[in-house]
Amino acid sequence: MLPSATVGTLELRSLVEPIRRILLRLRGHFLKAEAVNVEFAEKLVEVAQLDSCGEKQHFYVPYDKLVISVGSVTNDHSVKGLEYCHLLKTVEDAAKIRSRLLQNVERACSPLTSDDERRRLLSFVICGGGPTGVEFAAELFDLLNEDLTRYFPRILRNEISVHLIQSQGHILNTYDEALSKYAEERFARDQVEVLTHSRVKEVCPDKILFTQKGEDGETITKELPMGFCLWSTGVAQTDLCKRLSDKLEGQNNRHALETDSHLRLLGTGLGDVYAIGDCATVQNNVADHLVTFLRTMAWEQGKDPTTMQISFSEWRRVASRVKARFPQASDHLRRLNRLFQEYDKDHSGTLSFSELHELLQQIDSKLTSLPATAQRAHQQGLYLARKLNKLAQAGPGLRRNDIDYGDLDAAVFPAFAYQHLGSLAYVGNAAVFDLGGFSFAGGLLAVYLWRGVYFAQSVGLRTRILLAMDWSKRALFGRDLVSF
């Protein structure tokens, strides 16, 4: 809900909950410092903290179990001039954007400002047509159209322009196509210019250079006057994640730390280090684990895994093990009869090693990485908390039986299974919902439903009360236009 905070619809304190308040009832300890590196062999986290003289000091914090959830940074795509752009990742970013928006409007009202400079100051550009960019564009238009024209000279309304630059053919391209078109039609009606098939080339202090592909396929370089620019074009690894990835074997993803289906960081001790949220991705190499599945089955039957033939009953056993190890593959293993018949090329009533390998490779190709959304991180956090509690409860029994090795995670808890609950976005006094197979968009009723979802997902009672108060204040008195 950060886009709402940038325009004064919500207060920043309504979106966050002090971590110490959460840890109080759990008897947890909080240390505000920067994680610099991890020494996995010694089980130490290197952290940095400023001392009383303002000097950065480094020290180590030991761990038994380590959870890495440092999030991500905005992807710059090697574009020059991003120092002239604003980001929207933290409450500090939202506060800076709010001040800059009001500052531009105030400067545009000055009699010393020329017409060209006024148009530039009131040209607001958003780079990125994902949920964050679309919601910010919608909130910005609402602010300019509903509040600023009431308190500032009306002539400014004719000078205000909002531009949304998107590299794909549609905004909200991960949503249902009908919802993307609805959002584009809504923006067209509100005079928010959507520039699709466009890529930013360079950001200058007073303009943006971008390339746009025409209908004939020709790429043209254009420029756009800019008084404010928001950069919201995907995520990239933090410096800490890059350092950890470089020092660990088995980390081949350049965009996130790779984990197994139990969220354990690949390349570290089994069950010692976990990674969740935007900084991590779950590795789904079903075909690569085929040998393990077949070796186990062959060992049980005293056969060679590379030459054995898999009957339908044995295929069902393989499928059940695949689903237990990779829950995300369950949707692609529903019709076992059809899959067995489709890949039984020689119609022998059995599957050879090559046929089964081809089948699982096809499933591999259909498995996509988990979305970098709050609901994914929320589900992973709940999953990991429950599993660590389960491991703690099973600990005394494991120690009494001298069991301190092997895959203990899999022994006491199932693999992580992500459940996509849907996606939603605010598009200016309207909202769109993509609930996976069912989607809809609407006006005021959909907006209240959108608010209700975020209201229910707030951290606690305090933030829910503050959200309700902010929405009530906005309805009665308009948005808060105070700048600090």
Image (cartoon, rainbow, N blue to C red):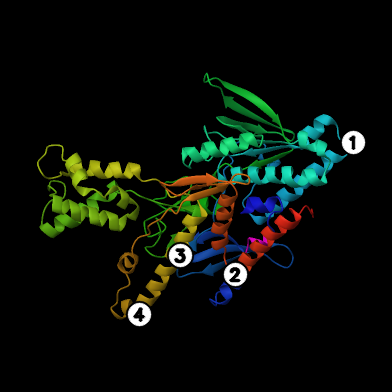
Q: Are marks 4 and 2 in contact (CB under 8 Å)?
A: no
Residue placed under numbered mark 3 in the picture = 382
Q: Secondary structure at mark 4?
A: helix
Q: Tell me if residue 171 comes above or below residue 383 in the rendering.
A: above
**Label drawn at residue 396:** 4
Q: Nearer the viewer, mark 4 or mark 2?
A: 2
Q: Nearer the viewer, mark 1 or mark 4?
A: 1
**Looking at numbered disc 3 in the image, what kind of residue is underneath it?**
Leu
Q: Position of residue 20 (x, y in %)?
A: 61, 71
Q: Nearer the viewer, mark 2 or mark 1?
A: 2
Rounded to the nearest angstrom, the CA distance separating label 1 from label 4 is 76 Å
Left or right: where does residue 398 sit relative to residue 47? left
Rounded to the nearest angstrom, the CA distance separating label 3 from label 4 is 23 Å
Range drawn in magenta: 12-19
Q: In the rendered image, which quarter is residue 293 located in?
A: bottom left
Q: Quadrant of the C terminus?
A: bottom right
Residue placed under numbered mark 1 in the picture = 112
Rounded to the nearest angstrom, the CA distance separating label 2 from label 1 is 49 Å
